[in-house]
Image (spheres, rainbow, N blue to C red):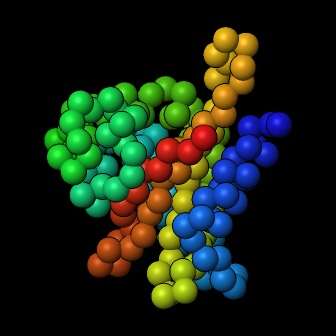
Amino acid sequence: MSMKQFKYILIFIISLLTLNVIGQPTIDSTELKKFWNECVNPIIDNDKDKLEKIIHFPLQGEWGFMMELNKVDRLWTKQDFFDNYGKLFANDLIENLKEQSFKNIEVYNHDNGTVELLVSVGWETMIDGFKYESGIIFRFKKFKNDWKLYVIQGVG
């Protein structure tokens, strides 16, 4: 299975488990380009000042486990996130994001009218001769009319 196929399968599984996909996306390409420039490029550029503005805390998901924080998840803080930023946003993840564009964004409309934008990365790891496929989904939604990263979800 190729990485591209794996990525699509991951997104499909997550959508079945956590999201209701209804109708056609309500966001046009102009807004998706703007979103990419304002929310994904700061990750690629390692711009922590901009990241502070686009991340909604408390940030949900498994990010603290990915950063190897040695405390229970309810105690994870914004300071923990930025102190351990490089553990999650390593070169491989950044390179994967650089290969993508706004065209890779998944748009989901919830039944309650909430729209979510998902940006995902996936990779393969060989351990003891076995191939393991993993990924991360960055989930964004609007808070007071601004797109914010509110969940970092590990998959695989």
Q: Tell me the quarter of the image containing the C terminus.
A: top right
Q: Is residue 53 left or right of residue 22?
A: left
Q: Quadrant of residue 28?
A: bottom right
Q: Is residue 127 left or right of residue 150?
A: right
Residue at 32 percent across and 74 percent down: it is 143
Q: Tell me the quarter of the image containing the N terminus.
A: top right
Expressed as whole percent of the image width and height from the top left, the position of residue 138 reads 48, 53
In the image, 109 versus 61, the foreground residue is 61
Relative to 101, residue 126 above or below = above
Relative to 46, residue 150 above or below = below
The reply to whether residue 32 is in sight is no
Expressed as whole percent of the image width and height from the top left, the position of residue 45 reads 41, 39
Relative to 147, residue 5 above or below = above
Specify the farthest residue to the bottom.
112
Relative to 27, residue 104 above or below = above
Q: Quadrant of residue 27?
A: bottom right
Residue at 45 percent across and 28 percent down: it is 90
Specify the farthest residue to the top.
128
Q: How many marks?
A: 0
Q: Quadrant of residue 14?
A: bottom right
Expressed as whole percent of the image width and height from the top left, the position of residue 13 reads 67, 58
Expressed as whole percent of the image width and height from the top left, the position of residue 19 reads 57, 71
Residue at 64 percent across and 46 percent down: it is 100
Q: Is residue 86 left or right of residue 111?
A: left
The reply to whether residue 17 is in sight is yes
